[in-house]
Image: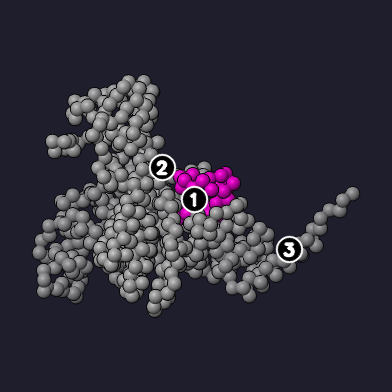
Amino acid sequence: MLSDGRRIELERKEAGLLAYLALEGSATRSRVAGLLWPDGSEQRARSNLRQRLARLRRSVGEIVVDDGQVLRLAQGVTLEPDGVSQLLATQHYDDCAEFDEWLERRRCAGQAQERERLLAEGQHLLDAGHFAEAVEMAERAIAVDPAAEEGYCKLMRWYYLRGDRAAAIAVWDRCKEVLRREYGLAPSPQTMLLGHAIVGSQRPATIPWPYRATPLTVLRPPRLIGRRKALQQIGSAWSHGQMFLVLGEGGIGKSRLLAEFAGNDRSVVSTGARAGDRAVPYSTLARLLAAANEQFRPELAPEVLLDVGRLLPQLLPAGSKAPRLATDADSLQFLKSLRSYAHACRAAGAGGVLLDDLQFADSASASVLRYLFDPGRCPQESWRAGFATRHDPATVTAREFVELLRASWQVAVVELGPLEISDIGNLVQSLQLDELCSQAWIDALARHAGGNPAYLLEAVKTILAEGPLASIPKTLPLPATVEAAVRSRLDQLTADARALAHLAAAAASAFSVPLAAETLGRPPLELTAAFAELESAQIMKGSSFVSCIVQAATLRSVPEAIRQVLQQAVASYLERERRRFPDPQPQ
């Protein structure tokens, strides 16, 4: 904004230039040119910079001081107070990688400063006896960065020590849900300890404090790493009016990929199914409709409003109630009204839908989604949609919908696999944790997490919570969240596959197909289906576990008595093999 009150819209690289100078103070021409125009020659980059500076002078005057070598902002030109956390939030700089990284670091730092300021002000208000105002400050701190746990922990503790245990538990539930839905993460061990202390106690107790915040970079790494090809695939499908389906195991990065793709595009409705949805019919669909209504406020005909009101009663006029679906004709009209609702959203500016965690969708919602997003019908209506799911959805209807999408040539299917070792190194480096940046630590974390980014980040959170380490331990920690995820996967296996996994975990490096065949009393060929099931579930690859962390979680799922029996069977097998094939005696 100029001093006379006028607002000038800047081109994105002009805005980037001013932002860089505002925060860095000054910079050489070559530095700025290289940051904003990295792909061409230095001469071309300098020429582009000269053109931008000339255009700035014409549009807003001498806003940049240029002595021929160094650039700085003119006196009186400042960045708005508290504006760093949202700096250039509507702009994208994918073509300027180094500048993009600098901008993300500055935003994170700005968020941290703003959050700390708000929480400090909240504590001051609380100490002065102004509880409601303190809570408002904490809520504002959470809004600045929903991934930072410190604001939730403050609120939980304040409510609990005030005697409002229910409110503290509500904040705890919100913290877990936001981290899971938006970032694919679980709370840190310190937050888990605080939450469990509140839930498990009927009266104020000693709660761990002060809280040690997990670094922002660990909660949400600054950059999406190792998924450039996948991002290009879904971008290409979207631009051609195709739907897309992202497949991968839990924690592999599906949610982050969708979030990165959506960016700040307000024409896209982004939401997801949740773990408890399959117990409540239409819960996934209701969440999708509510998100679309909040975003676009579509104008609906009275009969459509009445039908949609079955799932969104807040839309109904006061005192009215939507009728039940009593006949097949009612159900058909309901589906037609949902399609009309989609048309109304498009008319209000909606361009597409991104639905995460489809594996959790309830059967009723999955049935409607199949109707609304049938691959054979959807392209003619210019309705874009993207879905992300694990390979095997829980409900039959959701599984059938996923198979329909996979079978259609009109749907781009993107399979997300584990990160390569080079990408793991880049991910660890991006966390900006000096103590973990050595190649030895990167190799250890790669072996431990097996290329699953969420497992790696959970392990890093646990390592940081345990304090500084003088050296890399022989066994890295098994986070409780990862153990629970692996156990859930094991519970869904057939008995044969689960027995094979338990044996492999007990045998460790001694495991082999002949050992499995003899110990389980099955011919090797009869184990083929069990091995294939373990590979499909991302438990094992061939005769090895996909990662140390999965092997450790699998072993812990075996009861101690059974574990001892399995290990004794393995030892007996190895002894028999040693006797059959003794080591050659030295001559």
Q: Which residue, as the protein is rendered here, is positioned at the far front?
A: 128
428 horizontally vs 579: left or right = left
Q: Earlier in the sequence, mark 3 or mark 2?
A: 2
Q: Amino acid at mark 2?
A: Arg
Between residue 127 and residue 327, name the one nearer to us.
127
Q: Circle 1 — which element?
A: loop
Provide the residue designation for mark 2.
Answer: 228
Q: Earlier in the sequence, mark 1 or mark 2?
A: 2
Q: Residues within 10 Å of mark 1 (few under 14, many from 20)?
A: many
Nearer the viewer's eye, disc 3 or disc 2?
2
> Is residue 532 in view from this perspective?
no
Between residue 454 and residue 462, name the one nearer to us.
462
Provide the residue designation for mark 3.
Answer: 574
Q: Circle 2 — which element?
A: helix
440 horizontally vs 208: left or right = right
Q: Earlier in the sequence, mark 3 or mark 1?
A: 1
Residue 233 image point, x, y percent: 37, 44
Q: Amino acid at mark 1?
A: Pro
Q: Which residues are magenta?
A: 429-457
Residue 101, by quadrant, is: top left
324 horizontally vs 145: left or right = left
Please tell me which residue is depicted at 18% across the width and 49% down the height of the picture. 349
Discs 1, 2 touching: Cβ within 8 Å: no
Provide the residue designation for mark 1.
Answer: 418
Please tell me which residue is depicted at 30% across the width and 44% down the height of the picture. 84
Q: Amino acid at mark 3?
A: Leu
Judge whether 31 appears above or below 157 on screen.
Answer: above
Q: Residues within 10 Å of mark 3 (few under 14, many from 20)?
A: some
Judge whether 283 appears above or below 243 on screen.
Answer: below
Mark 3 and mark 2: span between their CA atoms? Answer: 46 Å
Quadrant (top left/top right/bottom left/bottom right) for the N terminus: top left
Nearer the viewer's eye, disc 3 or disc 1?
1
